[in-house]
Amino acid sequence: MLVGFLGGFVSSTAVFASLSQAKKNITSKSIYSTVVAGIFATIATLIAFLLVIIVVSPSLLQYIIWPVVGAIAVGGVSSWMFMKNNNEQKISITYPNPLDIMAIIKIALLIMGILLFVAITKQFLGLRALPITAFITGLFEIHGMAYAIALLYKDQIITLTVATKLLAIVVFASFVSKFALVWIIAHNRFSVIISLYLTVMLTVASGVYFLLLPG
């Protein structure tokens, strides 16, 4: 749980890729510990997502915070219930060291690339292309895109409604990439169980989001 959570702050996508590879030839052992690691990596990523928005444009939180908190709560509580099954074989996953200078440089370059990508899209294709940009970027990295969207809203380039929808697209895309990773790499019992967890989290988040969606 702790390894997954800490890894999720760096990159939940990397954690899922590592978990899927580790569980490619899975036995019944360590199944729940692996699932819990994946869920807590997702939770950490969503927390970091909210922190980015808080720092850049706190007013965006009024519509986006509750769907994300709903997903975090459901994922955390449900996976915690299975921790009693964690007296299992240890698992081995790897993730980037957040204190490594090269990792910091790579993250900085990635965020710069996302901002450049968004700026080019806005310049040549207009704001209507931003949903596509948000989805494509969200498949790989949600924090840089959240930062870019929050900046656009802060500078009054996009409205609250548009910003909220773009952030929702980013989060949705991040779940899509996780589904893809576990089924492409592992496609086994681990894939089924982790997909069920992710589906419940995404369903709760979507339900809360549409209830609170501004006009």
Image (tube, helix red, strand yellow):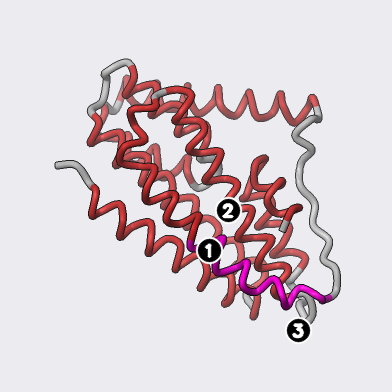
Quick one: 114 or 151, which is closer to the camera? 151
**Eye-nearest disc, 3 or 1:** 3
- Callout 3: SS: loop
Q: Amino acid at mark 3?
A: Ser
Residue occupying image coordinates x 49% and y 58%? 73
Report the disc number at residue 28.
Answer: 3
Distance between mark 3 and mark 1 Cα atoms: 21 Å
Distance between mark 2 and mark 3 Cα atoms: 23 Å
Residue 156's place in the image compared with 38, above or below, is above
Quick one: 132 or 213, which is closer to the camera? 213
Determine crowd level at label 2: few under 14, some 14-19, many 20+ residues with C-alpha closer than 10 A.
Answer: many
Quick one: 170 or 184, which is closer to the camera? 170
Q: Is residue 123 left or right of residue 15?
A: left
Residue 94 in the image: state x and y as whole percent: 80, 51
Residue 75 in the image: state x and y as whole percent: 53, 62
Report the disc number at residue 111.
Answer: none
**Eye-nearest disc, 1 or 2:** 2
Q: Amino acid at mark 2?
A: Thr
Residue 8's place in the image compared with 153, above or below, is below
Q: Residue furthest bottom?
A: 28
Report the disc number at residue 179.
Answer: 1
Q: Amino acid at mark 1?
A: Phe
Q: Is residue 67 left or right of residue 182?
A: left
Q: Is residue 149 left or right of residue 34?
A: left
Question: Which label's residue is closer to the chain start, 3 or 1?
Answer: 3
Determine crowd level at label 1: few under 14, some 14-19, many 20+ residues with C-alpha closer than 10 A.
Answer: some
Q: Which residues are magenta?
A: 74-88
Report the disc number at residue 42.
Answer: 2
Residue 55's place in the image compared with 136, above or below, is above
The picture quadrant where one finds residue 124 is: top left
